[in-house]
Image: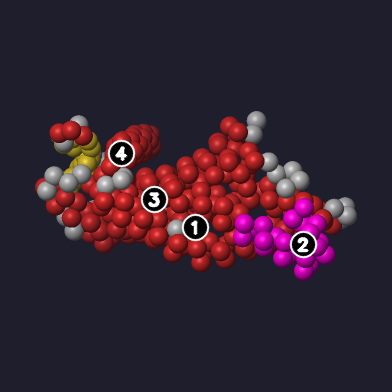
Amino acid sequence: MEKRGRWCRVPRGYFGSRTILTREPEFLEPPVNAWARIGRALLLGLRDIGRALRMLGEATSNTVFVFSRQNRYEVVHQMFLGGIKSLGVITIVALFTGMILALQTGLELRRFGQEVNIGTAVTVVLLREMGPFMTGLIIAASFGSAIAAQMGTMVVAEEIAALEIMSINPVRFLVMPRLVALALIMPFLTIYTNAIGILGGAIVGYTQLGVTFTAYFENCTRFAETKDLFVGLFKAFIFGVIIVTVACHQGFGASEGAVGVGRATRRTVIISFLTILTMGYFITRVFYK
């Protein structure tokens, strides 16, 4: 028989009722055939999506308390952990992303004598897609997995249950500061990624394709628009929300000790990657018809 964590509704005064994960296992009868297995997986997946969105809604409603002394400190601390401590990895990835884009694009443009236009190609691609996309993947793999591991460890160690007993809202205390921190820091990290990527493209253009820095940076803004920048920043904001929501939801659903924490961490990275890819496509389709 399949065993899953069971969710129940707990009244919480001013905040209304909310859904939390209890430690009681939920036993499910094994599916009778392949279609039943597929249907159960679909229904359980939709149920998990609904719970994650409910948690996101509750965390969003609690942002009114973000300016309290404890929450201010926690938001700044999470911005440091998720942003400043990730700058080293982001710098290397962004630099080589820009260099690869410039090299591959420049080699093709050189066949037509247009290698001077690599600045335009690199800038537009980074602003619209690759900047927020690469930033989202890096933060999901580093900070998102750390959040899931921390939440999962707190669940299996009964720390979340202790917060509930003390009438402390775990979503307000744990999820909301991380949500605000990553939603605020992701656009700035994306701007940094774009700048480093453009610089990497300039280095390749000058050293391998014979494009001067002056010509490269003049072409950077030839076809790039302000819309490209703001769409990329909007994507970064959405990606930050996705990462925290997925990480906290998976962490709160951890069970079976260290094995469950590892499973939650792995699922956080996979689901975040797939959701970022999917949402990136649909956002681009909405803004660039």
Which residue, given by chain and number where applicable, does mark 3 sit on? 181
Choose top left, top right, bottom left or bottom right for residue 100.
bottom right
Mark toward the viewer: 1 or 4:
4
Residue range corresponding to the magenta coloring: 195-218
Rendered image: mark on residue 213: 2
In this figure, which residue is indicated by the disc labeled 1? 138
Structural crowding at the residue carrying mark 3, measured as other residues with C-alpha within 10 Å and reported as few (<14), some (14–19) or many (≥20): many
Which callout, 4 or 2, points at the residue further toward the start of the chain? 4
Separation of disc 4 and disc 3 at Cα? 14 Å
Q: What residue type is labelled 3?
A: Ala
Q: Residue under circle 4? A: 64
In what quadrant of the picture does the C terminus appear?
A: top right
Determine whether the residue tagged by mark 3 lies in a helix, strand or loop.
Answer: helix
Q: Label 4 amino acid? A: Val
Counting residues from the N terminus, which is met first, the one under dot 3 or under dot 2? 3
> Quick check: 212 left or right of 143?
right
Mark whose residue sits in front, 4 or 3: 4
